[in-house]
Image (tube, rainbow, N blue to C red):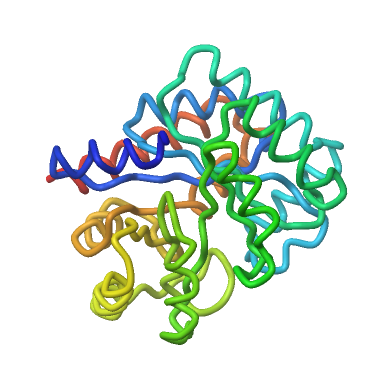
């Protein structure tokens, strides 16, 4: 219920959720530290990606991060350990696991959900699992008090939006651009119209991702959505860790603080 309580608390304060995406294991051994840094910098929810060898929905920046993590042999079990370590000192910040279905199927739905619940995960977003095929996983997640986060795109039909909203909880992830993660051109007028349209179908919060890079774009989206999701620009900075060390983590914190400040103004 952390997600529900988070959005309710933000609404009561007149604020919008800032939701960063990072990939677990990139850079190596730093994920828990980065998660705590993000919270200290003002984020409300963390989307924690888990790596897959064929991340077809992701652009070059995040796809390369997947390659790095896969080459290091980071497993789902390792990701659960990271969440557990984070929970040792933060039992409040919601965590959503985001990734592709194949590693989950290999582990098995029941084992995956049980271990996610034990670690302290609040929601799961499966990029390549349509709601029509999600019944078993959805039931298991709800049985453990976790949410399934669903994607809606600019081309999603009203009929499909209704189906998604019928099973939605936590928040909806509106993909603001056609294409893969890291795409560049963001039309806030179109996003505002689309979010308003989606809200006719549901009272579940709508968060927007893709194309958000700085304080200006984050502030613009926060005017029309319940949450602002930022990924590629942070993953791109963290990719520099091998050469620049802690400096890149500090820049990620600075970028997040800039977004938080702009959203709150």
- In this view, the residue farthest toward the top is 89
Q: Residue at x 54, y 19 (%)?
A: 87
Q: Position of residue 234 (x, y in %)?
A: 50, 46
Which quarter of the figure has residue 202? bottom left
Quadrant location of the N terminus in the rendered image: top left
Q: Is residue 224 left or right of residue 104?
A: left
In depth, the one of 115 and 241 nearer the eye is: 115
Q: Is residue 156 above or below residue 232?
A: below
Q: Residue at x 77, y 45 (%)?
A: 68
Q: Position of residue 110 (x, y in %)?
A: 76, 42
Q: Is residue 9 left or right of residue 46?
A: left
In depth, the one of 153 and 244 nearer the eye is: 153
In depth, the one of 81 and 203 nearer the eye is: 203
Q: Position of residue 121 (x, y in %)?
A: 57, 34
Number of labelled discs? 0
Q: Residue at x 15, y 39 (%)?
A: 12
Q: Position of residue 100 (x, y in %)?
A: 72, 57
């Amino acid at each position: 219920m952390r997600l529900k309580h988070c959005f309710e608390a933000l609404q009561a304060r007149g604020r919008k959720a800032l939701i960063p995406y990072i990939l677990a294991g990139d850079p190596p051994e730093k994920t828990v530290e980065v998660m705590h840094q993000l919270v200290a910098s003002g984020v409300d929810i963390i989307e924690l990606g888990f790596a897959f060898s064929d991340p077809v929905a992701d652009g070059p920046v995040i796809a390369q991060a997947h390659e790095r993590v896969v080459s290091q042999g980071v497993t789902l079990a390792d990701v659960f350990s990271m969440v557990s370590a984070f929970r040792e000192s933060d039992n409040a910040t919601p965590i959503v696991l985001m990734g592709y279905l194949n590693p989950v199927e290999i582990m098995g739905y029941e084992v995956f959900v049980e271990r996610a619940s034990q670690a302290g995960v609040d929601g799961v977003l499966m990029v390549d699992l349509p709601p029509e095929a999600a019944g078993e996983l959805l039931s298991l997640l709800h049985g453990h008090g976790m949410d399934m986060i669903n994607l809606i795109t600019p081309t999603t039909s009203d009929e499909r939006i209704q189906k998604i909203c019928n099973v939605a909880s936590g928040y909806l992830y509106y993909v603001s651009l056609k294409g893969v993660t890291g795409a560049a051109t963001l039309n806030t007028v179109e996003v505002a119209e689309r979010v308003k349209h989606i809200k006719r179908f549901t009272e579940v919060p709508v968060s927007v991702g893709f194309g958000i890079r700085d304080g200006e774009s984050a502030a613009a989206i926060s005017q029309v959505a319940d949450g602002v999701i930022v990924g590629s620009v942070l993953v791109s900075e963290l990719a520099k860790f091998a050469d620049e060390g802690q400096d890149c983590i500090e820049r990620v914190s600075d970028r997040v603080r800039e977004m938080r400040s702009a959203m709150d103004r």
